[in-house]
Amino acid sequence: MKTRMLIFFICCAFIINAQTQKKVHPNLNGITCKTCHSCDIPTKENPCVIPCPREKMVSIDQSPEEGPLVLTIDKFKKQTDIYAPVIFSHRLHAEMSGMSGGCKMCHHYNPPGQVIGCSDCHELIRKRTDVSKPDLKGAYHRQCMECHRTWSGKVECESCHTINGKKQETDSKTLIAKSEKRIHPKIIAPTILKFNTPKATGKVVTFYHSQHVDLFGLECQSCHTNESCVKCHAKDKTALLKAKTTEQKHAVCSSCHNTKQNCSSCHFNSVQEGFNHAVKTGFDISKFHGKISCSTCHTEKGKFTGLNSECINCHGKWTQENFQHKVTGVILDETHQALECTDCHQEKNYSKPICSSCHEDKSFPKNVPGKLIKKNG
């Protein structure tokens, strides 16, 4: 009896341990219990949470509506009598972060199911054992000043802090009302953008925004992941432009274009026409491939060169039995149905038939080897 009970408990422990090891959080790919907990079965009394280094921290994004409208930062009221607590418009900043790093910009460690405040990780006192981690005041200032300096070019203390005894320009009620009513105007995507690049060999870069989205299928996040509101709303745009290096300006384009060795593909001395597959590559896709997405043929992400345009590469070997000629807009007559494809399409040129091999006085499209119909594609 004792042996059976012992075996039963061992099996139960093994099953629980296996489930704990393999249990994956439904919202995060590859995140298991062991990612954050050192023990096999964490409990409320003993969660055994692993200290998380910043580069490996687990963090998720929440919608701005899930967070508070306004926060009052008053952790330092006992340390100083110079400044009043800071009224922080959390909802507004959360919405702005959507065009940049999201919640992770401030909440570096934000596991599923809870929001970790800054003071949970950063110590209030400046004298600390781990000098690699900023104290709470340093963490606040580093987060706020980085964005505000880019936006306005300067960061005075009173831009966020109100001196004690002085009336605050904005109180929490005003910020809450502003947050509730704030709706960003609808962003109308441009068709074409022209960039002047006086220091480059080609002075003009023509960017067809609509083609990159509608034709090439790029998502907004492909280019705008690391954007911020300051790009449109910066008070000092000159400082913003000067702050970017050439590599940073080309960073987004470099994911698809060779910006280091092929400047002439984007830089010209005049505005360029939009992308035309026939002109750019010599292969006209408008007849039969105009409605398929680029990724159907260009399967490797970010690479659009090096494909062989011969039909056989995608369609295999065509014969009279497996090819429906009517898709070309011509139903062949009985005479031409009996011929091999290469009798009319010499050297595998399927764009236009050659009649001269059999007929001295006929040519296409003046003479049609059958009946013309409307093409489906």
Image (tube, rainbow, N blue to C red):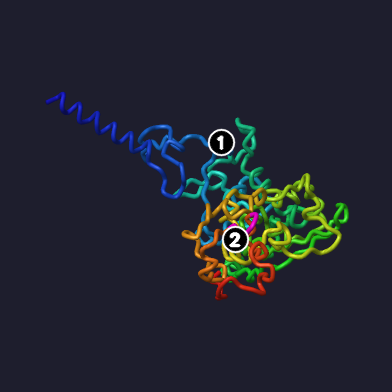
Whole-number angstrom distance, CA of label 1 to CA of label 2: 27 Å
Q: Is residue 266 above or below residue 135?
A: below
Residue position for label 2: 95
- Rendered image: mark on residue 292: none
Q: Check the picture and name the quadrant holding the C terminus.
A: bottom right
The residue carrying mark 1 is 53
Q: Given the current orientation, which residue lies at the most extreme left position?
A: 1
| Local crowd size for mark 1, using a 10 Å CA cut-off: few (<14), some (14–19), many (≥20) | few
- What's the residue type where badge 2 is placed? Glu
Q: Crowding near pointer 2: few (<14 within 10 Å), some, many (20+)?
A: many
Decide if residue 93 is in sight here. no
Residue 137 position, x and y percent, is: 65, 44
Give the SS element for disc 2.
helix
| Quadrant where the image shows the N terminus | top left
Q: Helix, strand or loop at disc 1?
A: loop
Q: Does the magenta portion include 345?
A: yes
- Location of residue 126 (image quadrant): top right
Q: Which residues are magenta?
A: 342-347
Give the image location of residue 280, x and y in percent: 73, 58
- Judge whether residue 239 can be spotted in this image: yes
Q: Amino acid at mark 1?
A: Pro
Q: Viewer-proximal residue, 297 or 152?
A: 297
Image quadrant where residue 161 sits: bottom right
Question: Which one is earlier in the sequence, the residue at label 1 or at label 2?
Answer: 1
